[in-house]
Image (tube, rainbow, N blue to C red):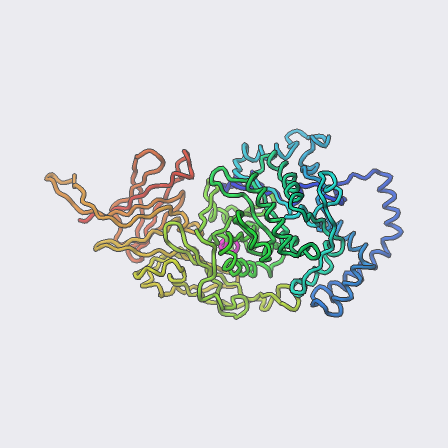
């Protein structure tokens, strides 16, 4: 996957090694090699018992699917299933969770499992195959230029915490608790009463010193392997387990404090000094209010590639959640698939969300066309400066089911311009009775989004005109003032992104830089944009010494790509200086006198110190 992305021209800078690298118990059955005699014994037993077991399992599954799955907490079917799950169905549910999921497992070791430590476990290593996590990390960084590698783990070790045996190995006390979900949680998620932690217990550590020891052990092998950061998941599962051991706020404080102390010591960015930690499954305020040094937190439910009804709702969730979460942390809008029917919808949202951009593509299955609208050839992205939030007129609109409103998300870019994304996400909404997304309209009709410059909160101090660039239409418009609207029709799951820049004027020139027009967040390419300057220049073309007035706009921009700006009239010349050498060259350009659209091509950035050497551009108008 990393090789394919690099070959496609969108090299990943960061990689997350997700769930699957740790030592857990019970051991996943597909990891075990069974001898022939054991397989024969199991086959005979299955021949005798499977027909009966399958019949019971089929009836139980049908009952759960048809009666229980959508039943409210405390309803008749919910209460019946809770009793069955804790008694006669408990062994069968254990078998289901053990064979079909990882949610019943506990952490049982700190070193990477045998898949990542073949040499250490005495397993044969094929030619070209990596023998350890450390070697994998080294190859990714040296051979494929990956800059940072993170590993996933749960806040309390694994989905069901830590095994008692592992605690005994390192001399810490691990107790097995059966969490009791609060009434409020059960009203939202009735299944929490019969999930694996509730049925089978969760291994928790309740002593501060023991937690410090625990995190020293869980992070030490990662540091040794060269891992740069961690994604800490299942955080609300810890607070839900607080019943009987001091409560959710207390246990969240203990775990979060120990975790942050460890990551502050072990996973600090050499470039920026930031803590390399992504918090996840952490929307409980018991978690959010505990962060002292970690700054990134997931803003939504997972991206579900196989649930078509979830994709529009995902955008609604991340945008409105960021209104709150953005005051506490940097919201993470989750990964998506670049080769997917909703890929552009998700990509457009990530481009203006002010969030990290990452994909969970099947290796080799990528849409480079989509990714190249987000990612430059060096693997960097044009990230907006703030958490993406709904525009003011969307705050109390029901963008999922009122049939008329578009979801609009605004953000600000580094050089002062703004960006607004408009999305048609009507037709699906959360059903609080069935606790799932409900399709309200299979094919919602076309809606019209109205976008105005003052949708960008940080542009409201500009009293003049604005240049508005439509990414999908590839068109330039001039808005007379901040309240002037641009109308765009949107089909279901359609979108557009508008880059908005104040127009600066002198007595002879109008100017507004937009950025890289083919990137979704065009304005994110501009590192710096200076004010229009008027200078006197000696005219060397005349025999006698004469001076003329020139107007100059200076712009610093990332590249490569088609740079877009608004100006009237057409410039006399455009000069570019790339890299550290002070050598300028002239660029050809195109200008539409009707719309004011100015375009010119920027080359790739200097290969010397690539990220730190954006192009220096001078756009010049000579008075005639």
Q: Is residue 269 above or below residue 471?
A: above
Residue 301 found in image quarter = bottom right
In the image, 467 versus 460, the foreground residue is 460
In the image, 600 versus 88, the foreground residue is 88
Q: Which residues are magenta?
A: 345-349
Looking at the image, can residue 28 be seen?
no
Residue 60: where, in percent of width, then height? 79, 61
What residue is shown at x 76% (from left), y 49% (from top)? 98
Looking at the image, can residue 588 be seen?
yes
Residue 167 found in image quarter = top right
- Main SS class of the magenta portion in the image: helix
What residue is shown at x 43% (from left), y 51% (from top)? 385
Horizontally, is 241 left or right of 557 in the view?
right
Residue 537: where, in percent of width, then height? 18, 42
Horizontally, is 587 left or right of 360 in the view?
left
What residue is shown at x 55% (from left), y 42% (from top)? 264
* Quadrant of the rendering where the N terminus is positioned: top right
Instruction: Give the total number of marks visible in the rendering.
Output: 0
In the image, 113 versus 589, the foreground residue is 113
Residue 270: where, in percent of width, then height? 49, 37
Q: Is residue 213 above or below residue 236?
A: above
Q: Is residue 192 within the magenta segment?
A: no
Q: Is residue 552 above or below residue 607?
A: below
Residue 598: where, in percent of width, then height? 32, 51
In the orientation shown, which residue stands out farthest toward the top?
A: 127
């Amino acid at each position: 996957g990393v090789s394919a992305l690099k070959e496609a021209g969108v090299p990943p800078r960061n990689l997350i090694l997700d769930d699957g690298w740790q030592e857990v118990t019970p051991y996943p059955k597909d990891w075990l090699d069974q001898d022939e005699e054991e397989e024969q014994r199991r086959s005979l037993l299955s021949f005798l018992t499977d027909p009966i077991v399958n019949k019971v399992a089929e009836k139980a599954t049908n009952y759960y699917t048809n009666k229980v799955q959508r039943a409210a907490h405390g309803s008749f079917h919910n209460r019946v299933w809770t009793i069955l799950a804790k008694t006669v169905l408990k062994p069968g549910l254990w078998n289901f969770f053990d064979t079909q999921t990882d949610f019943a497992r506990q952490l049982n070791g700190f070193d990477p499992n045998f898949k990542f430590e073949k040499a250490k476990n005495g397993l044969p290593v094929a030619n070209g195959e990596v023998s350890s996590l450390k070697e994998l990390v080294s190859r990714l960084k040296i051979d494929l230029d990956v800059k940072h590698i993170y590993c996933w783990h749960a806040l309390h070790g694994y989905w069901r915490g830590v095994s008692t045996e592992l605690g005994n190995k390192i001399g810490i006390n691990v107790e097995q608790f059966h969490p009791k979900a609060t009434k409020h949680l059960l009203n939202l998620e009735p299944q929490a009463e019969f999930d694996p932690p509730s049925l089978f217990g969760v291994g928790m550590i309740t002593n501060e010193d023991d937690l410090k020891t625990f995190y020293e052990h869980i992070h030490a092998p990662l540091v040794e392997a060269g891992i740069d950061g961690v994604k800490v998941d299942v955080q609300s599962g810890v607070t839900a387990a607080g019943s009987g051991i001091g409560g959710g706020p207390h246990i969240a404080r203990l775990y979060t404090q120990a975790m942050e102390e460890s990551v502050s010591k072990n996973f600090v960015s050499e470039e920026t000094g930031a803590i390399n930690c992504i918090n996840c499954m952490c929307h409980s305020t018991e978690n959010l209010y505990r962060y002292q040094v970690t700054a990134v937190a997931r803003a939504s439910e997972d991206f579900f590639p196989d649930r078509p009804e979830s994709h529009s709702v995902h955008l609604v969730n991340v945008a409105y959640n960021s209104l709150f979460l953005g005051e506490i942390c940097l919201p993470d809008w989750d990964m998506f698939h670049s080769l997917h029917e909703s890929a552009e919808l998700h990509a457009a949202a990530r481009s203006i969300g002010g969030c990290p951009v990452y994909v969970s593509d099947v290796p080799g299955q990528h849409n480079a066309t989509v990714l190249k609208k987000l990612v430059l050839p060096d693997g960097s992205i044009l990230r907006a400066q703030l958490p993406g939030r709904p525009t003011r007129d969307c705050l109390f609109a029901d963008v999922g089911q009122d049939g008329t409103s578009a979801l609009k998300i605004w953000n600000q870019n580094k050089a002062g311009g703004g960006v607004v994304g408009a999305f048609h996400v009507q037709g699906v909404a959360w059903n609080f009775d069935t606790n799932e997304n409900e399709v309200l309209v299979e094919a919602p009709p076309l809606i019209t989004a109205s976008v105005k410059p003052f949708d960008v909160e940080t542009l409201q101090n500009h009293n003049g005109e604005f240049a508005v660039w439509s990414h999908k239409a590839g068109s330039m418009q001039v808005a007379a003032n901040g309240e002037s609207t641009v109308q765009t029709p949107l089909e279901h799951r359609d979108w557009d992104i508008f880059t908005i820049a104040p127009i600066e004027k002198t007595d002879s020139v109008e100017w507004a830089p937009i950025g890289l027009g083919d990137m979704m967040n065009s304005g994110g390419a501009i590192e710096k944009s200076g004010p229009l300057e008027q200078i006197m220049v000696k005219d060397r073309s005349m025999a006698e010494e004469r001076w003329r007035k020139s107007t100059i706009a200076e712009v610093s921009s990332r590249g490569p790509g088609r740079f877009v700006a608004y100006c009237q009239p057409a410039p006399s010349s455009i000069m570019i200086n790339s890299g550290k050498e002070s050598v300028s060259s002239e660029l050809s350009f195109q200008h539409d006198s009707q719309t004011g659209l100015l375009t010119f091509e920027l080359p790739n950035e200097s290969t010397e110190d690539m990220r730190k050497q954006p192009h220096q551009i001078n756009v010049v108008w000579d008075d005639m």
